[in-house]
Image (cartoon, rainbow, N blue to C red):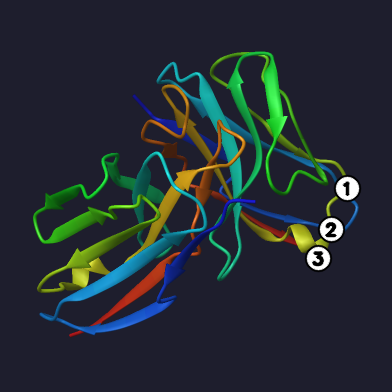
Amino acid sequence: NAGVTQTPKFQVLKTGQSMTLQCAQDMNHEYMSWYRQDPGMGLRLIHYSVGAGITDQGEVPNGYNVSRSTTEDFPLRLLSAAPSQTSVYFCASSYSNIQDTEAFFGQGTRLTVV
Amino acid sequence: GQQVMQIPQYQHVQEGEDFTTYCNSSTTLSNIQWYKQRPGGHPVFLIQLVKSGEVKKQKRLTFQFGEAKKNSSLHITATQTTDVGTYFCAGPGAAGNKLTFGGGTRVLVKP
């Protein structure tokens, strides 16, 4: 099993550009989520999904879109990148409700918006 | 909303010494999870505590859940350089289906 795979690992965007961060898991996990990590602020939830076809907002959803067309994939789209979106992005999955079970994290995508 | 606070934010430890990091919630938690993130790495699950007053050990790491289920601690004995990293606690979000992370304790070990 590869676990949770994120691509790309690094990305530099210009302000206003759009892009999609990819996340895939091969553990047949129902729950998937996206976090951003900024210095001194821990991990903040952007969006999450409890199953294919179902998504919901986390703490900091503005400027981001998600979709969940399959159990395996949960891409995160930046609509119009802004410097405030410079961060490290982590995708996480868990077998069921993330509150009750271990979360598995991807390797992260380090995004810089200039 | 529900908040999870961790102290200290930074911990400089001499190799071989013990230290403790603390996690406090503004609300009662049904459970609490702990994760470790090595420098440049991703968070890795360490443990979950569920019962009031629960204590669990993993080698040199001792995790405790408070009696009121509003706080937790991680105690590391005889710190080693392999303990370097950031330790996060995380609790259920107020609205369900969410995990709220504390700000983390970044541990630096002096050899």
Q: Residue B103 appears at what percent x and percent y?
A: 50, 64
Quick one: B105 or A25, which is closer to the camera? B105
User: Residue drawn 57% across and 32% down?
Assistant: B96
Q: Secondary structure at mark 2?
A: loop
Position of residue B48 in the picture relative to residue B95 (left or right): left
The CA distance from mark 1 to mark 3 is 12 Å
A40 or A73: nearer the viewer? A40
Determine which quarter of the picture holds residue A47.
top right
Task: Decide which of tag 2 and tag 3 comes sooner along the chain.
Answer: 2
> Residues at marks 2 and 1, common chain?
yes
Q: Could you give the CA–CA distance between mark 2 and mark 1, rounded to whole angstroms? A: 7 Å
Looking at the rendered image, the disc whose residue lies closer to the viewer, 2 or 3, is: 2
Residue B42 pos. (x, y %)? 43, 51
As drawn, B96 above or below A40: above
Q: Number of marks in the image?
A: 3
Q: Amino acid at mark 1?
A: Ser
- Do the dots labelled 2 and 3 sit on one chain? yes
* Label 1 vs 3, first from the N-terminus: 1
Q: Chain of mark 2?
A: A
The answer to whether B54 appears left or right of A59 in the picture is: left
